[in-house]
Amino acid sequence: MTRKKKEPQNQTSSRYPMAADKVREKPHKISEVQAEYGIIVQTGKSDNPKILKTYSSRLAEQKRKLVAKSAKLSIASPRYIAGVEMPDTVWQFARKNALFPHLETALRLVHECFPEVKSIKLAYEFDWEIKNESWIAINIQVPGEVDNVLKQYLFFNRQIPQQILPDKSDKILLGIGGLGNP
């Protein structure tokens, strides 16, 4: 019994010669679905497709507008509300939505509900999935047991609707960090 020796195949040939020719003809073919949804686009400069970012560019535009407005003000001294520094974007959003008295109330409630609060920082945030959905985040660092902080948080959430109008309280949210740190 003799074995047949396999002849070495040519490296450039393919098992499917017709498919190999099609691939060589259109190395960067884009499917109709990709072209329709704009995930991949052809650029005129090269044959390679360019992958676009999947998140919306309107979010960057919204933040850019707020930063541009705050740059026009060019006030040298930082702004404070209830003893907490306000970044320019927070100040612009609070002014646009008439939130100053409500923000002061929320900061007072933070001190009342979280007596051991270490730090408070304000930030302007927005939802990148929902157009025109943005708010001021009150980010606090609170040491202590999770159960105790949760009770304080629930008390805070019961007090907010009693002291701030619903259409204004939706634009002020609380974020808690630093749990378990002494």
Image (cartoon, helix red, strand yellow):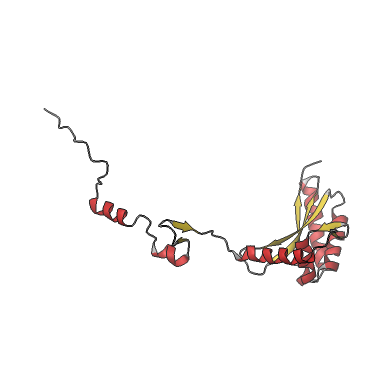
Can residue 92 be seen here? The reply is yes
Which image quarter is the C terminus in? Answer: top right
**132 versus 115 height, above or below:** below
Residue 12, quarter of the rendered image: top left
Where residue 112 sits, quadrant-wise, is bottom right
Q: Residue at x 33, y 57 (%)?
A: 26
Q: Residue furthest left?
A: 1
Residue sitting farthest toward the front: 45
* Closer to the camera in the image, 164 or 62: 62
* 42 sits left or right of 139 in the view: left
In the rendered image, which quarter contains the N terminus?
top left
Marks counted in the figure total: 0
State whether residue 171 appears in this view: no
Q: Position of residue 121 (x, y in %)?
A: 79, 54
Residue 118: x %, y % from top left: 84, 48
Q: Tell me residue 160's x, y (percent).
A: 81, 64
Q: Nearer the viewer, residue 70 or 35?
A: 70
Residue at position x 81%, y 68% in the image:
99
Q: Residue furthest top?
A: 1
- Toward the viewer: 1 or 59? 59
Residue 36 as seen in the image, left or right of residue 3: right
Residue at 79% from the left image edge and 61% from the top image edge: 157
Q: Does 117 appear above or below 38?
A: above
* Residue 123 occupies quadrant: bottom right
Q: Position of residue 51 (x, y in %)?
A: 48, 57
